[in-house]
Amino acid sequence: MTKITGHRGARNLWAENSLTGFAEVVTLGVDAVEFDVHLTDAGELVVIHDATLERTTHGTGEVRALSPEARAATRLKDSTDAIPTLDEVLAVLAPADGIDLHVEIKLDAQRSPYPGIAEAVADRLRAHGLEQRAVLTSFDPGILSDCRLHAPQVRRLVSADADWVGRQGGLEGFVAAVSDLAEIVALRHDFLAANWDEVCRLWPRERLCAWTVNDAETMRAWLDRGVGHLTTDAPDVALALRKGVPA
């Protein structure tokens, strides 16, 4: 059965990457919750998607420049929540037994990895006892290599789109490049659909993820295909549809 992952919590329902959204999404019955992590220059691991503040908060500037005090004072749009720390998010999700955590490690505003972020994230997962429920994810193979080094027991997921695959010379080159880096391959849903047969020849479908699927018709198609994982901003819709798909 396809596993349903709430993207940035469930951003069609609640403010993305918010503590409120994380607390609520686990009540829907999702299989996993996805969220994004940046590292500030002050050493805080913070949960927010963009490397800059403008789109999702009432602040301005780069996430990495936030002091702990400024981070706690910066409110998310469409929410009274502040930007959460990774520790705060893990504390909310830890009691939700059986729900996996897809932890995406992000790049900074210059598209460079934050030094030491993989090790720091692995340390916090360990501290919260969540290594067995976590999946460390990234578009960046260097970050995934760091994850393998610092948390070899934690599962990994590589995300990619058509451009990423093209830079590897096509699907066979891409799979060869990531086969020892990740257990799960997540491909943009339209690219995966267009190359479904070839991808399934190269990688087990139960370890494939389609992202980010938000309309009911497309969700139903992926559920019918039996893709291993489906990431969506509307997990409530996906879960309702899954009830009608034979296991």
Image (cartoon, rainbow, N blue to C red):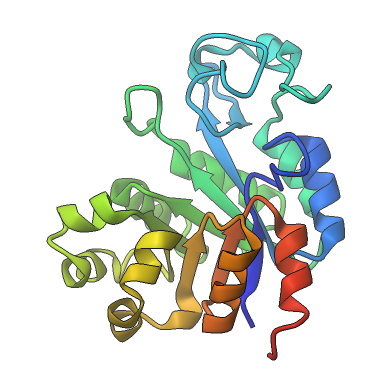
Does 107 sit above or below residue 166? above
Identified at 80% across, 52% down, the residue is 25
| Residue 241 rendering spot, x and y as whole percentages | 73, 72
Query: Is residue 95 something that shows in the picture?
Result: no
| Residue 165 rendering spot, x and y as whole percentages | 24, 58
Assign the N terminus to one quadrant of the image. Answer: bottom right
Pick out the residue farthest to the front: 217
Q: In the displayed structure, does residue 43 sit left or right of residue 85?
A: left
Q: In the displayed structure, does residue 227 sit left or right of residue 87?
A: left
Pick out the residue farthest to the left: 169
* 232 and 180: which is toward the camera: 232
Number of marks drawn: 0
| Residue 4 rendering spot, x and y as whole percentages | 66, 66
Identified at 65% across, 19% down, the residue is 57
Q: In which quarter of the image is residue 35?
A: top right
Query: Is residue 156 something that shows in the picture?
Result: yes
| Residue 89 rendering spot, x and y as whole percentages | 73, 41
Q: Quadrant of residue 75?
A: top right
Identified at 16% across, 52% down, the residue is 167
* 124 and 29: which is toward the camera: 29
Q: In the displayed structure, does residue 82 sit left or right of residue 199?
A: right
* 158 and 223: which is toward the camera: 223
Does 200 sit above or below residue 171? below
Q: In the displayed structure, does residue 158 sit left or right of residue 15?
A: left
